[in-house]
Amino acid sequence: MARHTITLIPGDGVGPEVSAAARRVIDATGADIEWEVHDAGLDVMERYGEPMPAHVLDSIRRNKVAIKGPLTTPVGKGIRSVNVALRRELDLFALVRPCKWYPGVRSRYENVDLVIVRENTEDLYAGIEFAEAEPQTLELIEAIERLGGRRIRDDSGISIKPISIYGTQRVYRFAFQWARDNGRHKVTAVHKANIMKHTDGLWLRVAEEVSKEFPDIEFEDRIVDNMAMQLVQKPELYEVMVMPNLYGDILSDLCAGLVGGLGLAPGANTGDEIAVFEATHGSAPKYAGQNKANPMAMMLSGVLMLRHIGEREAGDRLEAAIAAVIAEGHSVTYDMKQQRDDPSAVGTSQVADAVVAALERAPVPS
Ligand code: NAD
């Protein structure tokens, strides 16, 4: 029997290609993994009647660890994101997104090594929405006015932003502990407490309270708009930044941009018992099936996964092999070249070949 059983959801769009590449290099580390492969997303709707069928969730609950490719959410068609639903269903409340610069990556910045911890279950992503002109929406508008709020225009759509003490406490405890376990010294709370006093204000207050439980970690806060500017001007000042769901979504892409783009940004959705690893990028449909997408974000998600399951040495070796391929600069995809149409760019599977070769060159500690 393999030492670890892990659920693998290939995803759609470029998902199957980057997932196959990541699986190859993870296996090449020698970590003893049995994969339970399950499809999910819009492609399985017809077969199972839902995008995230119960047997897939059961597999993740059983194995406690999964790695997934991106899943497409059609914009504005009333279909909710399967990715968001998965995080909520499994209560994966903290999304850890490291943004690290590797020598050889073309970027305006060097030596960036930030981590975003994004609260994953609350805020405007709670999925509590009311469409314009629906009877419930008009009733809600009446109730808000009656309860002392201001009159909202009758033709408004409404999205609700809940932020709880419980949800905030657990994500900060997780972030401070993560900082401590990973040799980081500072946590920055990101918020807009000056405007949203009862949601972001609560978020900041609870952050300050939790910070007292971790006196060895420095604590500070930044208003989100200022944070965006500071990240562009002096990213080296920050270590672990904790954000409510929406700001975390937006600033994750900004930070990915600081270190070479979405092709290099991994992530770990983490709960009390279960973790689901995935790249920050989406399904990039225009490159689907073309062997073009950069698999490194998915591979780096694999690095996080290996460390999470206790295969720290395999994770470190895989990260070093990816870094070696980047530093060497030949076997990289189009997005890592100066010109996007550079004919020397290689495809997704060739990156996997190069990482496997780099792993084979690296000595395995006895
Ligand atoms: P995207 O991340 O798919 O693409 C944004 C840009 O980055 C595009 O130009 C794309 O070609 C490029 N890109 C993305 N990944 C790349 C890679 N690995 N290598 C090279 N280039 C890459 O974002 P989008 O276009 O906003 O979303 C497309 C779909 O993905 C949507 O349906 C969205 O809902 C979904 N999505 C899913 C997830 C997830 O599964 N967690 C996350 C984000 C978006």
Image: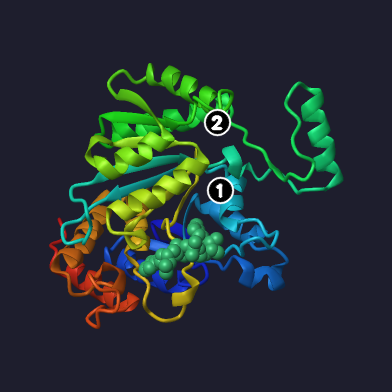
For label 1, the crowd category at 10 Å Cα-Cα, with few meaning under 14, some 14 to 19 and many 20 or more, is many
Q: Which mark is residue 87?
A: 1
Quadrant the C terminus occupies: bottom left
Instruction: Tell me if residue 13 comes above or below residue 152 in the rendering.
Output: below
- Front-most of 131 and 85? 131
- Residue 35 visible to the viewer: no
Kindly indicate the quadrant of the structure image that contains residue 331: bottom left
The residue that appears at 20% across and 65% down in the rendered structure is 326
Q: Secondary structure at mark 2?
A: helix
For label 2, the crowd category at 10 Å Cα-Cα, with few meaning under 14, some 14 to 19 and many 20 or more, is many
- Front-most of 306 and 158? 158
Task: Give the Cα separation between the discs numbered 1 and 2.
Answer: 14 Å
Residue 192: percent from the left, percent from the top? Answer: 48, 30
Residue 23: percent from the left, percent from the top? Answer: 38, 67
The residue that appears at 78% across and 22% down in the rendered structure is 147
The residue that appears at 44% across and 76% down in the rendered structure is 287
Amino acid type, residue under disc 1 in the picture? Arg
5 relative to 344 in the view: left or right: right
Q: Which residue is mark 2?
A: 167
Is mark 1 in CB contact (under 8 Å) with mark 2? no
- Residue 345 visible to the viewer: yes
Instruction: Tell me if residue 205 comes above or below residue 6 in the rendering.
Output: above
Amino acid type, residue under disc 2 in the picture? Gly
Q: Please count the marks in the image.
A: 2
Q: Secondary structure at mark 1?
A: helix
Quadrant the N terminus occupies: bottom left
State which tag comes first along the sequence, 1 or 2.
Answer: 1
Residue 91: percent from the left, percent from the top? Answer: 57, 42
Instruction: Tell me if residue 177 comes above or below residue 310 in the rendering.
Output: above
51 relative to 291 in the view: left or right: right
